[in-house]
Image (spheres, rainbow, N blue to C red):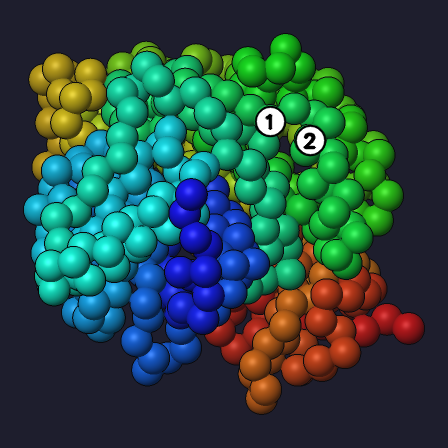
């Protein structure tokens, strides 16, 4: 039996790349290590344990992961270094070949990361004692084949912000031609509604007011338990003490009309949706193997705006995928421009080994990708500024977040408008009504005055 006292008094450093789900999982690991007596290494301190939670959505993400690992190893000599996440699942050997790495943990083993860390640290200390070996002994790889990635590791954490992130689902059964997520995270699986409601109730007991519902493909919730995402939405809506829910990202074909209608009348589900489009061209959507067309997407957006006129709608778009001809891009641009959406999250296509997209012959040059990306980012800035301007003068509830002394305090309205006020510590984690004013100096938030 492993002695958990090996963790007592140790200091840990964490580095997370990628999606909100990764950040939620890292935060949960940090909370669990804290229960074993591990504290966070502060700036300038050398950590005893380093945990890197990686992303592999693009080649740039892979590069950032490698940089982060090298940096942590250099800054924390002798630390027990653990690498997990999507890059660790997809390219474990690349990480095992990195000097200073002690353990690489795959998707199926991630839920037992604390146990693996204790076992690894104990083994390394025993080896040093017996052989007077260097702390940098042979790294260990803990991976299960893709078909065996079945477990669901729960996570509900706050991190450094006011909002909590509740992981309800993991993995994906969609095989879009550009994406490696099904390989990196496995098939769609989820926790039970009963267990997720209990986690939300604990958030309320801890004083949390807002929960972001997160996962890889949350609309596909229910494969493990035979339940549905709509069932989950209705159950969470009944939890006493939670005042706000946000749905982090949901596929347009899984965002049913009944979910939209329910959120339109719910006091707890905020007027805020994030919906991946990926391309506004039907031809490109077919090449991507997406499960909807632009007609369905427009229907969802127009239904939301008809029922919730002030709703914030964020949209993901990928530019420069294989097969995106100039004509297809122009069609996509004009379609997106015509939609009453609020903001775009624009990504440049990155070729991923093992994906079907590599079989598509037409290749977009890096320069063209950049040009298309800039056009869409400019369009996004216009739409966001227009939406913010439409909110000036309105009275809105804002959940404020902690800020360092002398710095302005920020928070978000129910419809996700960023608000800035002078630092007022007593408003941390408080929902207060404000009257929205003009743009702040940086033009990235609206100023506000408290309404008595």
Q: What is the number of the mark on residue 195?
A: 2
The residue located at (73%, 27%) in the rendering is 194
Q: Is residue 402 above or below residue 377?
A: below
Q: Nearer the viewer, residue 65 or 259?
A: 65
The residue located at (36%, 44%) in the rendering is 116
Q: Nearer the viewer, residue 218 or 309?
A: 218
Q: Nearer the viewer, residue 398 or 186?
A: 186
Give the secondary structure at mark 1. Answer: loop
Q: Is residue 382 above or below residue 263?
A: below
Residue 284 visible, this angle: no
Q: Residue furthest right?
A: 452
Label 2, label 1: how many angstroms apart (C-alpha)?
7 Å
Q: Quadrant of residue 9?
A: bottom left
Q: Residues within 10 Å of mark 2 (few under 14, many from 20)?
A: few
> Where is residue 327 drawn, in percent x and y?
24, 24
Residue under label 1, please give it. Answer: 191
Q: What is the number of the mark on residue 426?
A: none
Report the quarter where the C terminus lies: bottom right
Give the secondary structure at mark 2. Answer: helix
Q: Quadrant of residue 440?
A: bottom right
């Amino acid at each position: 039996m492993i002695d958990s006292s090996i963790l007592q008094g140790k200091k840990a450093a964490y580095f997370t790349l990628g999606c909100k789900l990764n950040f939620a999982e890292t935060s949960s690991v940090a909370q669990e290590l804290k229960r074993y007596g591990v504290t966070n290494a502060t700036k300038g301190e050398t950590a005893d344990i380093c945990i890197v939670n990686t992303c592999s959505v693009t080649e740039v993400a892979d590069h950032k992961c490698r940089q982060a690992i090298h940096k942590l190893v250099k800054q924390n000599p002798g630390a027990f270094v653990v690498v997990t996440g999507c890059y660790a699942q997809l390219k474990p050997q690349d990480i095992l070949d990195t000097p200073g790495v002690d353990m690489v943990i795959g998707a199926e083993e991630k839920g037992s990361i604390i146990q693996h860390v204790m076992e690894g640290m104990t083994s390394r200390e025993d080896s040093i004692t017996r052989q007077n070996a260097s702390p940098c002994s042979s790294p260990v790889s803990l991976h299960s084949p893709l078909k065996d990635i079945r477990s669901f590791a729960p996570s509900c954490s706050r991190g450094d912000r006011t909002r909590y992130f509740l992981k309800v689902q993991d993995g994906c059964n969609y095989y879009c031609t550009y994406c490696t997520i099904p390989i990196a995270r496995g098939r769609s699986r989820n926790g039970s509604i009963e267990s997720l409601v209990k986690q939300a109730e604990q958030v309320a007991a801890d004083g949390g007011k807002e929960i972001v519902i997160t996962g890889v493909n949350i609309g596909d919730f229910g494969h493990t338990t035979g339940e549905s995402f709509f069932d989950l939405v209705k159950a969470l809506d009944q939890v006493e003490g939670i005042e706000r829910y946000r749905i982090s990202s949901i596929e347009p074909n899984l965002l049913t009309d009944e979910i939209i209608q329910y959120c339109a009348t719910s006091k707890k589900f905020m007027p805020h949706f994030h919906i991946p489009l990926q391309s506004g061209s039907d031809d490109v959507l077919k090449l991507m193997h997406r499960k909807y067309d632009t007609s369905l997407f427009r229907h969802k957006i127009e239904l939301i705006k008809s029922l919730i006129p002030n709703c914030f709608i964020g949209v993901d778009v990928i530019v420069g995928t294989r097969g995106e001809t100039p004509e297809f891009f122009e069609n996509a641009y004009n379609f997106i421009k015509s939609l009453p959406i609020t903001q775009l999250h624009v990504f440049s296509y990155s070729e991923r080994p093992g994906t079907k997209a590599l079989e598509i012959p037409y290749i977009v040059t890096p320069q063209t990708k950049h040009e298309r990306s800039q056009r869409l980012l400019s369009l996004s800035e216009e739409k966001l500024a227009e939406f913010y301007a439409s909110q000036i003068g309105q009275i809105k509830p804002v959940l404020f977040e902690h800020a360092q002394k002398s710095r302005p305090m920020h928070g978000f309205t129910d419809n996700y408008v960023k608000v800035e006020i002078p630092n007022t510590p007593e408003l941390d984690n408080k929902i207060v009504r404000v009257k929205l004013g003009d743009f702040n100096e940086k033009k990235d938030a609206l100023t506000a005055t408290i309404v008595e």
